[in-house]
Image (tube, grey):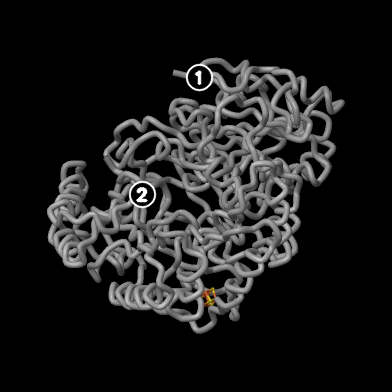
Amino acid sequence: MPVSGPAADSAAGPGAADFLPLSRAEMEARGWDALDVLLVTGDAYVDHPAFGAALLGRWLEAHGLRVGIVAQPRWDTPTDVARLGRPRLFAGVTAGALDSLLAHYTAFRKRRRDDAYTPGGRAGARPNRAVIVYSGLLRQAFPGLPIVLGGIEASMRRAAHYDFWDDNLRRSVLLDSKADVLVYGMGERAALEIARRLQSDPRTARRPDSAAARELLRGIPGTAWWHGAAARPDAAAAQPLPSYEDIQADPRRLMAATLMIEQQALRHSPALCQSCEGRTVLFAPPPPPLTTAEMDALYALPFQRRPHPAYREPIPAAEMIRFSITSHRGCAGGCSFCALALHQGRQVQSRSAASILAEAAALTRDPAWRGSVTDVGGPTANMWGAVCAGRWETCRRASCLFPELCRRFRLEQTQAIRLLRNLAALPGVKHVRSASGVRHDLALGSVEYVRALVAEFVGGQLKLAPEHSAPRVLRLMRKPDFAVFERFLNLFETECRRSGRELYVVPYLISAFPGCTDEDMRRLAAWLGRRGWSPQQVQCFIPTPGTVASAMFYGGIAEDGAPIFVARSDAARLRQHRLLLNAVKRTGSRRHEQPRPAVAD
Ligand code: SF4
């Protein structure tokens, strides 16, 4: 059932003028009769850089564009997406911070009851396949308006992909949504270029229309576009992926397509194309990563760091991040199940220490400030400042850390400690916490880093992601050997004794990963039992769209094409999951029990 978001055309409440407009009244208060860009999102509008619509909206606003947001619109009628009027240039569509199917269903396809990105934390504020549904509504509301997809749902579904919820292969979401262009990855550069081209071309400057826009917007770095059956020079110049029909005929072909898309996302590589039912989808290479100066400028935009005042109930995700700081984006880890490197890139893009310190100083002036910076991090806490000393543009490795640390990977973890200490020394700051997951193989490279983390910056629990203990499974995941995790635990425990602090490790574990057998799960459970651990962060593997691990699940093969065992049915997956949970329960230990429930239920 659709539910309504904030009341349409709600009067501008206190502080509303400091946010991007959510209503006609707020547009009119700014003296705007029309927007340049309308953003439609499946999340509530929280004006914080961790929310994609806010980040992109503020970025476009900083480049002189009039941007408004329709957040969590009704989807039984186009009137809600139309409430700010037809924008002059284009409408951007995102499902929100998560793929809408992942947001709605557990690993065993049960409906979730909550949604952290919605007022009151209630589920049901966005439709399944949100980008397709929102695009359809926009087509009805504004015929001919260029529609641009973005965000994680669109990004990871940009080519033919396995859909766990349909248990089937799906076409590119660009074709299913009938949108004009898709922005993959972090969209700042691509979205700005789209706006500039539409603004500056005489064919579209007055009233852009979908067909002309599709011509004009081809080839922008970081985008995908499509065209019909007629042969086109851009497709002739692109490297062909296995087609949708090829993959349907032989699911193992999804692996080849996924690895080619991954390579394109990680380095400078040629355009790709994929044919599907007589049409062709093309994928331009990604734009260059943001520089430190650009990252600093982005995070210095006038974010209010809180939900728009139209909301009456708290939004759990906004509460969680209100006093946290994003220090970097991108991940060099390249884990095969993770969408992050594919979305944010392998190159770590870090903010400067000065920019992070300025943000922390601003946090201390918030009336709700209680003295704690709750997190300083990114996808992986200890990758801030990491750089490639080689030529990443031509590097074919999917991971800088696996199967072994690349000798060109440079990371000075003592810099991170200096940063955390400088943050802690700011007036009004009582605590600084590092709550993002730590990459334990990297942390082992600096005893000084682990010592400082333990003594000063871990609040009680340290999140680590060994994910499994079986060597074969870890290789399929592109994770370090389990012995590395055990070495880290020894160091961690030594440092806990040295500092006199009682801290716990929160190990994140995955059951039913492709290649994992029941016996592998029993061995992992036995290891946990020997340590007397009762971890609650056990996630049953979900083959999310577009990852290498999902290609393993769908095709039943490893990256090298070798056949692997896959626990495919829900019954087989649940059995693996229970093997771990039940064995852990039998230990009767409450040590290391975590406060959050298991993700899969
Ligand atoms: S050369 Fe090494 S550090 Fe640079 S991108 Fe490749 S793997 Fe990473």
Which of the 4 quarters of the picture holds residue 85? top right
Looking at the image, which residue sits at the far front? 500
Where does label 2 land, which residue?
246
Name the amino acid, label 1: Val
157 relative position to 77: left or right = left
**Residue 270 x, y percent position in the rendering:** 58, 62
Query: Under tag 1, what secondary structure?
Result: loop
**Residue 79 x, y percent position in the rendering:** 62, 16
**Residue 255 x, y percent position in the rendering:** 36, 57
Q: Is residue 277 above or below residue 139?
A: below
Looking at the image, which residue sits at the far right? 31
Q: Residue at x 36, y 53 (%)?
A: 254
Q: Residue at x 52, y 42 (%)?
A: 97
Looking at the image, which residue sits at the far bottom? 407
Choose between 155 and 447: the one closer to the eye: 447
Mark 2 / mark 1, whichever is N-terminal: 1
Q: Is residue 212 above or below residue 481?
A: above
Q: Quadrant of the N terminus?
A: top left
- Dot 2 crowding, Cα within 10 Å, few <14, some 14–19, many 20+: some
Rounded to the nearest whole Å, what is the CA distance between mark 2 and mark 1? 40 Å
Which of the 4 quarters of the picture holds residue 374? bottom right
540 relative position to 585: left or right = right
Residue 21 in view, yes or no: yes
- Dot 1 crowding, Cα within 10 Å, few <14, some 14–19, many 20+: some
Where does label 1 land, which residue?
3
Task: Identify the disc placed on residue 175.
Answer: none
Q: Is residue 573 above or below residue 74?
A: below
Name the amino acid, label 2: Asp
**Residue 384 x, y percent position in the rendering:** 58, 68
**Viewer-nearest of labels 2 and 1?**
1
Query: Under tag 2, what secondary structure?
Result: helix
Q: Residue at x 51, y 65 (%)?
A: 457
